[in-house]
Image: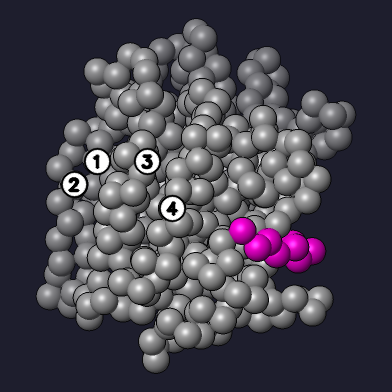
Amino acid sequence: MKIEKYIGRNGKPVDNKRKVSAKDGTTAVIELRHKNWITRFQLDGKHHQLNLRTTDERTAAATALDKVRAASRDQWDFVHAGQAKKGVITIGQCIEIHIGQLAPNCANKHLANGGNRLRGLISQALGIPGRLKKDSEGIHSWPEVDRLPATILDSHLIDKFYAHRLKGLDKGEARESRIRGANSHIQDARSVFTKASLADGRYPGLPDISSFVNKQKLKEMKKSFKYEAVDNEIQRLLAHLPELKESNPASYLAFQLTAVLGLRRGEAAQARKSWITSHKGKKVLYVQATPTWVPKGRQERKIPLPEEVHSEILLLSDDSEFIIPALSANYRYEKVFNVLSAWFLKICKDWPDTKKAHVLRKWFGAEVSTQTGNLFAAQILLGHASHTTTMNSYADLLNVPEYEINLTAEQPVNKQAAVG
């Protein structure tokens, strides 16, 4: 038996791989993954991966050769011997490790959400009831999903998930919306397995899940944003801003945070007065993680805050740490945005009837893209993790040289220059 360093495609040796050969011509490649050696081989057009369940290099090499020989003779009982689920980490254990890991600027709620999105993906893909249960200590679990082995995490699982989510939707905007939702769901589910965690071997007994992690997302159609139509509607809203400010200050501030600062609904609800700071002599709102919440995609950012809007925040906010006053003890922002949505529909008959407040954020992004001619500026201010999100929505709006936005009840057309 001969053990040599494995030479990769770039002509350089791979540290964690070895090429093994025997006198009878049998060859194998072994790879050190986490603490154990594994082997991969191809037979009759099918790829096979086996955990050799040993940390010793020579033992692993000899076992790999025996497995390859047995496979060539169709002795699959011997090949699969020792490959039982014993020692393989379960989905529940993966989530438990994920929630317990150190994650800078990441709240517990965000970690739990990643675990639940993984559970939901598996539940839908395999048709398993996704029943959330709480034990005597108040800890939530999905018993039917949590007991499954991590070996189910592969590209086929994602294919089944897509098939379930897109069932009955052959084309059209409904399908595109469902694709975007499914892609987002998968991205959140994958967050359980960060590259750093996989490299550190933090998940004991985790099989090779590279096909699950690297599976390409479904392509989406370019999203069109009808800027001119929405801009016309917003100009109509400006005439009624004093009325909204007088009747419902909380919804008025929600309008300012989404239209003037481009915040998401959840970010607007979490926005705190302590986020208001200065940058190069200009006031900015620093969107950042808190002990109980993190921005979507963990995208912290600083957004220019017009002086007029800052004054209205000081005038209209309550005594709490939040910018938007609470209308009830249980819901900080649901009722606020419901009132805002009803106000849209009362004034603008053509206002989009879905994600009403989110349209203000998209208008903000269109204004920034249009006036700067710089998609990167819009990406940073919107907190998009990928430039493709910004490009798909606003790439056709690049034509005006500077970014100036300020919409207040007193000065609806006065504009504030951007902060660098």
Residue 381 is drawn in which quadrant? bottom right
Mark 4, mark 1: which one is toward the viewer?
4
Amino acid at pointer 1: Ser
Q: Among all residues in the image, which is located at the extreme top?
A: 44
- Does the CB distance between marks 3 and 4 fall below 8 Å? no
* Residue 38 visible: no
- Does the CB distance between marks 4 and 1 fall below 8 Å? no
Classify mark 2: residues with Cα within 10 Å, few (<14), some (14-19) or many (20+): some
Q: Which residue corresponds to mark 2?
A: 130
- Does the CB distance between marks 2 and 1 fall below 8 Å? yes
Q: Label 2 to label 3, Cα distance in Å?
A: 36 Å
- Does the CB distance between marks 2 and 3 fall below 8 Å? no
Q: Quadrant of the N terminus?
A: top right
Magenta residues, dominant SS class: loop
Residue 128 in the image: state x and y as whole percent. Answer: 18, 39
Residue 266 in the image: state x and y as whole percent. Answer: 41, 62
Amino acid at pointer 3: Trp
